[in-house]
């Protein structure tokens, strides 16, 4: 993502030449001419990246910045990046020299006079941008296109204040511009279609994936991203979880390239606050109201990597290397001695239960896999066998290790078989009453001192604990699906959980090679509390006809580095499951912004639950 702006910045194109007819047969409309000469105003991180993309694609680039240091730094950056490309044999030395020759820098906006396209990438200040556009009106050719790189301010307002509003649009590249494929082409009600077409074609010629969006703060990618980042900041501010655990949870639990707090530091805390302020002004959604900690850090000058300190502390301003500070973990989890765990019981027979049993068995624990019948327990063990077979075929496991893991699992048709285990892990249906009844039974069956864990992803752990006579022994162990592959476990303490129980579970996680993160007993824990509002907001975008599922999925994968787009993920998780979690979050936090999107409710009511039913936000071939 982007430090000095937000993840991305725009680029533009030229106008459509008017073609006269010479006969009674209508001529086809002329194709828009894509810009050959582009002026980039503002040579910070994003402006420099855009200039590199353009020069390497054969465009003449006029770089303009009133700061000579910024201009020199841009030239040096381009020289270094093209030199790396030569070393990696991506371009020849001749091509490198040609690209460098196409980039010239100036201090004065007059240099943009002959540009076909001007891309403004100055700081996110409306008055500054308005002044730039007002001056350009008197400098550039009438057919030149003016693009703003804003992702928070109104493109419509900038266009309305311009002498030629029809040629003003937004072009939102993502940082680092040379690597990121997504470009959001932002038009408003005043923008001429020819300008949009020309800029869109330019983006394709640059090797980018353009998506067309309307003018609203954040557009698609940042509109979804910044709400999620804001909630992560608020979660940290409330001391619900540490910065390290929040970031690890989202990376390991969702496959994201960066944790939200590290990403805020990269983008810039001040930039994030500016974007959120604009989003809140437009939406009045409390989820967009900047978390107070963002303002506090920004006012203190702790704006992230560029300042050397934000949520984390860095070696130096601009460095990516995190160094320890007063908030760094320092053995806090080793204060209590844990209990000895020799044998593990897993209650359940579904996908999650068999996956958890496999995790423990592969790590050398004897496992009792207990279900409602011996037949169900044996079917669950057979599922483990198939999973282990796949691992052997892929070379991840030896045949001997497969046999040892299978031998470690004992199927049982009654919970009485868990009488001697040291850790009992419940993995049954996500129904509170079912879980409460199961914990009441475990309370009677399991020996004193056994740790009782629930794998719930959204229900209150303390409700399970209160169903027993030993609530101090109860804790949450939220594995992620598929359990054998996913490294994350959310360790959920209630207000009643004993310290040694918490220490025991963390030690067990280490033995099974999982990464534990600590959190309190509230709806969604870390991952789901941050993930599902983001998914819900994506549904609202479609519901409001702002963007299509395909464009939104492309925006988050190409612009945010997400492994799956929100609608792909919703269809995989199941729309009914997603709706249930949204309802739990809304009931717990009572925030109107967390109310499930009506479109999600309608699809669930219609039986369109995603891949498992053959139709959700998309249709799937029946197996």
Image (spheres, grey):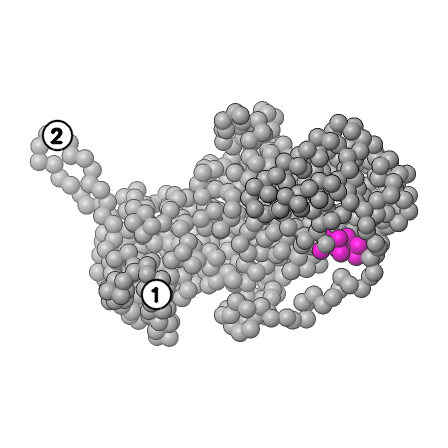
On the question of residue 457 being in view, the answer is no
Q: What element carries label 2?
A: loop
What percent of the width, then of the height, locates residue 495? 82, 52
Asked which quadrant contains residue 573, the reply is top right
Most common secondary structure along the magenta stretch: helix
Look at mark 2 in the image and give the residue it sits on. 25
Q: Which of 281 and 199 is in front in this view?
A: 199
Q: Nearer the viewer, residue 435 or 22?
A: 435
What percent of the width, then of the height, locates residue 478? 71, 46
**Residue that appears at 51% across and 48% down:** 562
563 sits to left or right of 481: left
Q: Nearer the viewer, residue 161 or 581?
A: 581
Picture layout, residue 519 above or below residue 465: below
30 sits to left or right of 435: left
Q: Is mark 1 on a helix, strand or loop?
A: helix
Tell which circle, 2 or 1, labels the residue nearer the N-terminal end: 2
State how far apart marks 2 and 1 are (Cα).
Answer: 55 Å
Are the residues flagged by discs 2 and 1 in contact, CB closer than 8 Å?
no
Residue range corresponding to the magenta coloring: 502-510
The disc label shown at residue 87, or none:
1
On the question of residue 487 being in view, the answer is yes
């Amino acid at each position: 993502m982007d430090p000095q702006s937000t993840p991305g910045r725009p680029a533009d194109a030229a106008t459509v030449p008017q073609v006269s007819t010479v006969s009674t047969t209508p001529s086809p409309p002329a194709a828009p001419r894509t810009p050959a000469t582009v002026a980039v105003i503002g040579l910070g991180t994003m402006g420099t990246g855009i200039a590199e993309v353009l020069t390497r694609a054969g465009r003449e680039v006029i770089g303009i910045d009133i700061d000579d240091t910024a201009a020199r730094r841009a030239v040096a950056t381009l020289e270094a990046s093209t030199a790396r490309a030569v070393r990696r044999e991506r371009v020849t030395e001749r091509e490198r020299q040609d690209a460098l020759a196409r980039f010239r820098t100036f201090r004065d906006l007059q240099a943009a006079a002959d540009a076909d396209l001007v891309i403004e990438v100055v700081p996110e200040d409306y008055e500054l941008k308005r002044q730039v556009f007002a001056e350009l009106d008197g400098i550039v050719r009438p057919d030149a296109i003016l693009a703003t790189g804003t992702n928070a301010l109104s493109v419509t307002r900038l266009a309305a204040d311009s002498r030629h509003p029809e040629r003003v649009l937004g072009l939102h590249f993502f940082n680092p511009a040379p690597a990121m494929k997504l470009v959001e082409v932002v038009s408003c009600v005043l923008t001429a279609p020819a300008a949009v077409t020309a800029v869109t074609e330019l983006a394709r010629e640059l090797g980018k994936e353009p998506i067309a969006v309307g003018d609203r703060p954040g557009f698609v990618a940042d509109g979804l991203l910044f709400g999620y980042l804001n909630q992560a900041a608020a979660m940290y501010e409330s001391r619900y979880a540490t910065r390290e655990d929040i970031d690890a949870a989202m990376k390991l639990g969702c496959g994201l390239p960066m944790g939200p707090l590290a990403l805020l530091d990269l983008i810039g805390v001040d930039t994030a606050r500016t974007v959120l302020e604009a989003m809140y002004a437009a939406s009045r959604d409390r989820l967009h109201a900047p978390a107070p900690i963002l303002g506090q850090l920004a006012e203190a000058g702790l704006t992230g990597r560029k300042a050397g300190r934000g949520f984390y502390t860095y070696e130096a301003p601009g460095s990516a290397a995190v160094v320890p500070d007063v908030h760094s973990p320092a053995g806090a989890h080793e204060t209590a001695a844990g209990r000895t765990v020799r044998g593990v019981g897993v209650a359940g027979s579904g996908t999650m239960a068999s996956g958890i049993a496999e995790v423990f068995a592969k790590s050398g624990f004897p496992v009792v896999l207990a279900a409602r019948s011996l037949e169900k327990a044996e079917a669950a063990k057979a599922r483990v066998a198939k999973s282990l077979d796949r691992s052997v075929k892929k070379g991840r496991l030896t045949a001997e290790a497969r046999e040892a893991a299978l031998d470690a699992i004992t199927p049982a048709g009654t919970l009485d078989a868990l009488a001697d285990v040291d850790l009992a892990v419940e993995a049954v249906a996500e129904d509170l009453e079912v879980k409460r009844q199961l914990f009441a039974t475990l309370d009677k069956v399991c020996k004193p001192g056994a740790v009782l864990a629930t794998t719930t992803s959204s229900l209150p752990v303390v409700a399970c604990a209160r169903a027993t006579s030993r609530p101090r022994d109860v804790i949450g162990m939220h594995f992620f699906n598929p359990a054998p592959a996913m490294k994350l476990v959310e360790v959920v303490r209630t207000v009643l959980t004993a310290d040694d129980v918490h220490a025991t579970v963390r030690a067990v996680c280490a033995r099974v090679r999982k990464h534990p993160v600590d959190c309190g007993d509230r709806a969604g824990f870390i991952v789901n509390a941050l993930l599902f509002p983001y998914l819900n907001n994506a549904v609202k975008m479609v519901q409001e006809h702002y963007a299509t599922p395909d464009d939104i999925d492309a925006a988050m994968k190409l612009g945010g580095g997400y492994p799956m787009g929100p609608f792909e993920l919703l269809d995989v998780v199941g729309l009914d499951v997603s709706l249930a979690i949204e309802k739990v979050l809304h009931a717990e936090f009572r925030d109107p912004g967390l109310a499930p999107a009506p479109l999600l409710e309608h699809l669930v009511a219609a039986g369109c639950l995603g891949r498992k039913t053959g139709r959700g936000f998309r249709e799937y071939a029946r197996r």
